[in-house]
Image: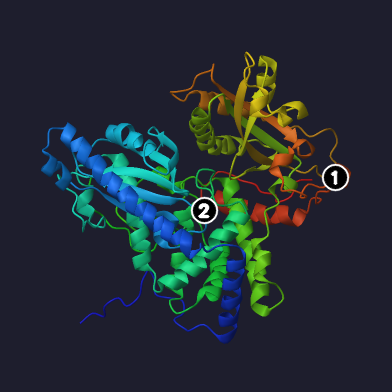
Amino acid sequence: MANAKSYLGVTPPISTAESNEREKEVTITLMEELRRQGMFESEEEARTREFVLGRVSALVKEFVKQVGMKRGLSEAAASAAGGKIFTFGSYRLGVHGPGSSIDTLCVVPKHVSREDFFEVFESMLREFEGAAEVVGVPEAYFPIITASINGIPISLMMARLALSTIPEDLSLQDDNLLRNIDERCVRSLGGSRVANAILELVPNVEVFRDSLRCIKLWAQRRAIYSNVNGFFGGVAWAMLVARICQLYPNAIAGAIVSRFFIIMYQWSWPQPVLLKQIEEGPLQVKVWNPKLYPADRSHRMPIITPTYPAMCATHNVTASTQMITTEEFKRGSDIVDKVIVGSASWSELFTKHDFFHKYRYYLQIIASTGNADLQIKWSGTVESRIRQLVMKLEYVDSLLLAHPFVKGFEQVSYCVSHEEVRAVAQGDISETIAKRKKEDIEGKEGAGPVYTTTFYVGLAVEPKRPGSVGPRKLEISYPMTEFTRLVKMWEKFDESTMGIVVRNIKSSSLPDNVFDPGERQPKQHQKRTKVCYAFVFHWQQLRTTYLSEGIKQVKYFPQDA
């Protein structure tokens, strides 16, 4: 009789040993540090979240009932149709912190359409007691409504199943639920299905959660937590931590974090990270398969979801973001090694990034409108295209790396003339405009607000080699022009109400709002690390590896000259 598989994951564990005394000690200090860093919400906030979810659940049922009656169902049949909410993301995984949003999926029966969700439900939400900042984005890749309810941020997506009623005991893990529904609903269901699967595939849920809280905080502080900008998003970080937990099923959090950095720094990309073997299913849909699909072969750091249909959660990674992430794995590994031997503290792992001190040149991308709701949609559209700009910059010969920052900086400027509007849209905000308040322009003809969201890409320029003569040239006008053209191709783009500016600035011209109070040094004292050619050699070795694997030539340099 064949032996049954006795482990979780696609390979046996590396070690089933219990953690030693030192690992137990550093786990205690890790948890103390996470509490100091404010990673745990209060009991009161936890209760408020549960209360909000209960209210939203009741609202979804009422929404389904109202739509059903409009479709001709009797009141009894419309009420029986149900409707159910599921959480996903950090809340479902149990690693959310104070003030974090609850990712919520509203599952509805077949007579409820997506249009109903953004017309009827969104309107109901706007009238809902305690609801504020309700914004629907129906055209997004994941159509979503965001809101704040009783002070709790919440993100709501919808999935329509091919069922007449939604039973209270519905489980989303049944692959057959994916039959006869559209692709957007399949994607929306994926978040909750993946979160459930991750929790089922780790040997110890509490160890997984403690370890993931650490890695999430580290990735956020080091500014490498952003799927849209080409780094890893929340689900990818969760799957990486889950895989380490599978490899060390009896280890505790301090040991898992230590092994996380060692293994991830040395991982043989593009070897995929899998929590379980990829499975086929009942649909004629694409399942991740690099042998079959050229696009899947191009994924640089594939981390594959453990539910059907298997997808790559890290398809946005570029040559530059791979290099940056790898260097952060190395830094993390070095620090945690010192923590284990007692020569460093956990707080050093969570030191803030140095993005705005790291480069001499930056690209500044400014999205602007005159309306708050429109700005959310326009800036989101621009941000979703920045990865394309980075990929175009990677082809520029004298650029070693294009480093996108993981968030935009939002500002509202109150302008009294077209000239001021134009200047703000181009990133030139005078001291007079910066100090002006909303009440200062009330009643003035032609005056109004300008909403801007500014994104940054750090440019690591190839250092001037010893003995070379003449100035270095950096020709990036083509990538900038192509990016501008790309974002203006958005079907809802309106030249008269939306602005987009891309410009190259020096570090000395960075605005104060990208720095924390007291972080910016006086300009005469600003210094930047000189070129270290050992790092160039290190990344040229990686580049050689990439070339041998048929991947586009990439270069990296961690510090500009």
Describe the element under mark 2 as helix, strand or loop: loop
**Relative to 165, is 297 on the left or the right?**
right
Please report the residue visible at 81 percent of the width from the left and 49 percent of the height from the top: 528
**Relative to 182, is 555 on the left or the right?**
right
Describe the element under mark 1 as helix, strand or loop: loop
Q: Residue furthest bottom?
A: 21
Please report the residue visible at 59 percent of the width from the left and 25 percent of the height from the top: 500
Q: Earlier in the sequence, mark 2 or mark 1?
A: 2
Please report the residue visible at 34 percent of the width from the left and 67 percent of the height from the top: 200
Q: CA distance from mark 2 to mark 1?
A: 34 Å
Q: How many marks?
A: 2
Q: Which residue is mark 1?
A: 522
Q: Position of residue 110 (x, y in %)?
A: 19, 40
Q: Which residue is mark 2?
A: 99
Q: Nearer the viewer, mark 2 or mark 1?
A: 2
Question: Residue 322: which numbered mark, if any?
Answer: none
**Relative height, residue 491 to residue 521 (above, below):** above
Which part of the image, by quadrant, shows the C terminus?
top right
Q: Position of residue 2 (x, y in %)?
A: 23, 79
**Relative to 220, is 246 on the left or the right?**
left
**Relative height, residue 378 to residue 58 (above, below):** above
**Relative height, residue 28 to residue 51 (above, below):** below
Q: Residue furthest top?
A: 445
Residue type of the residue flagged with mark 2: Gly
Residue type of the residue flagged with mark 1: Pro
Q: Position of residue 118 (x, y in %)?
A: 33, 34
**Relative to 516, is 390 on the left or the right?**
left
10 Å crowding of disc 1: few (<14), some (14-19), many (20+)? few
Q: Nearer the viewer, residue 365 or 476?
A: 365
Q: Position of residue 37 (x, y in %)?
A: 61, 63
